[in-house]
């Protein structure tokens, strides 16, 4: 994960999740009936398990959050500023609640 983060993002440290976009859901040149491959999400379970207690989450809860987080990145969401971060966290919470899980930020 460290190597991937360095190679693709230029960040020389490990991370918990990486998302690599393939097709954009917003590409108007792709026919509406064509199947899209949004991309790949790579999770680092050891990193996620290590950081989970610091966020008050179990490793499983943190892993679910990181999967949803990665999926939102593939759909064009980001957290480069406070407004974007708040929007992304609200969506993460909503998605996880819809799936029957607790608010990861509570």
Image: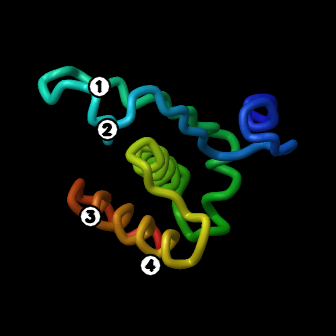
Q: Position of residue 31 (x, y in %)?
A: 19, 25
Q: CA distance from mark 3 to mark 2?
A: 24 Å
Instruction: Decide: is 3 above or below 17.
Output: above
Q: CA distance from mark 4 to mark 2?
A: 31 Å
Mark 4 closeness class: few <14, some 14–19, many ≥20 residues within 10 Å = few
User: Which of the pair 23/71 is nearer the observer?
Assistant: 23
Eye-nearest disc, 3 or 2? 2
- Among the two numbered marks 4 and 2 on one chain, the one whose residue lies closer to the N terminus: 2
Q: Position of residue 99 (x, y in %)?
A: 23, 54
Instruction: Decide: is 5 above or below 87.
Output: above
- Among the two numbered marks 1 and 3 on one chain, the one whose residue lies closer to the N terminus: 1
Q: Which residue is mark 4?
A: 106
Q: Position of residue 26 (x, y in %)?
A: 32, 41
- Among the two numbered marks 1 and 2 on one chain, the one whose residue lies closer to the N terminus: 2
- Among the two numbered marks 3 and 4 on one chain, the one whose residue lies closer to the N terminus: 3
Badge 4 vs badge 1, beta-carbon distance below 8 Å = no
Badge 1 vs badge 2, beta-carbon distance below 8 Å = yes
Eye-nearest disc, 4 or 2? 2
Q: Which mark is residue 97?
A: 3
Q: Which mark is residue 36?
A: 1
Q: CA distance from mark 4 to mark 1?
A: 34 Å
Mark 3 closeness class: few <14, some 14–19, many ≥20 residues within 10 Å = few
Q: Quadrant of the C terminus?
A: bottom left
Q: Is residue 49 left or right of residue 19?
A: right
């Amino acid at each position: 994960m460290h190597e991937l983060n360095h190679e693709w993002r230029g960040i020389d440290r490990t991370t918990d999740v990486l998302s690599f976009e393939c097709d954009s859901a917003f590409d108007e040149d792709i026919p509406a009936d064509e199947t899209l491959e949004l991309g790949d999400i790579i999770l680092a379970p050891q990193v996620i398990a290590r950081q989970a207690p610091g966020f008050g989450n179990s490793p499983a809860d943190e892993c679910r959050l990181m999967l949803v987080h990665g999926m939102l990145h593939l759909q064009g969401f980001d957290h480069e500023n406070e407004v974007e971060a708040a929007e992304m966290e609200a969506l993460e919470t909503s998605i996880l609640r819809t799936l029957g899980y607790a608010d990861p930020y509570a």
